[in-house]
Amino acid sequence: MGVDYITYAYAAAVAVGGVVGYVKAGSVPSLGAGLLFGSLLGLGAYQLSANPSNYYLTLGTSTVLGGIMGMRFLNSGKFMPPGLIAVLSLGMVARLGARATGLTGNKVE
């Protein structure tokens, strides 16, 4: 399997979102969380690119991040940034879940 560009793009979006949150609002927690989750997702993208059956880190990180940002979206009602990250995370969980169950034809074992 080749490079998993979708997961790398997702990781970059999370990391850049943390940096933008810091620059615009001076939010150190946004910077820390964005860089932490972005780094974990980048490592997960590397693992997926090397071995498509090694999706656990990416799936777990996406699930946690989607839950956190989903709750922030529900509490604040603001789509940017929590709603966007929650939607991207849900998409990644669905993508990896479909791959794991064999719905995409790329079933991993």
Image (cartoon, rainbow, N blue to C red):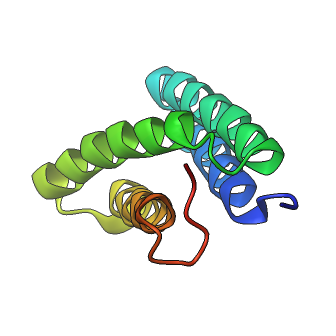
Residue in view at x 35 percent, y 44 percent? 63
Rendered residue at 63%/37% (across/down):
38
The answer to which quarter of the image holds residue 24 is top right
Residue at figure coordinates x 57%, y 77% from the top left = 105
**Left or right of 99 on screen, residue 40:** right
How far across and how far down the image is residue 92, in percent?
Answer: 48, 60
**Residue at the bottom extreme, as displayed:** 104
Vertically, is 70 above or below 30? below
**Observer-nearest of 66 and 28:** 66
Q: Nearer the viewer, residue 109 or 53?
A: 109
Residue situated furthest front in the rendering: 109
Q: Nearer the viewer, residue 63 or 49?
A: 49
- Position of residue 29 measured from the top left corner of the image (x, y, whole percent): 45, 23
Residue 52: image x %, image y %? 69, 51
Q: Quadrant of the N terminus?
A: bottom right
Residue 36, placed above or below residue 2: above
Above or below: residue 75 compared with residue 26? below
Residue at left 41%, top 57%?
93
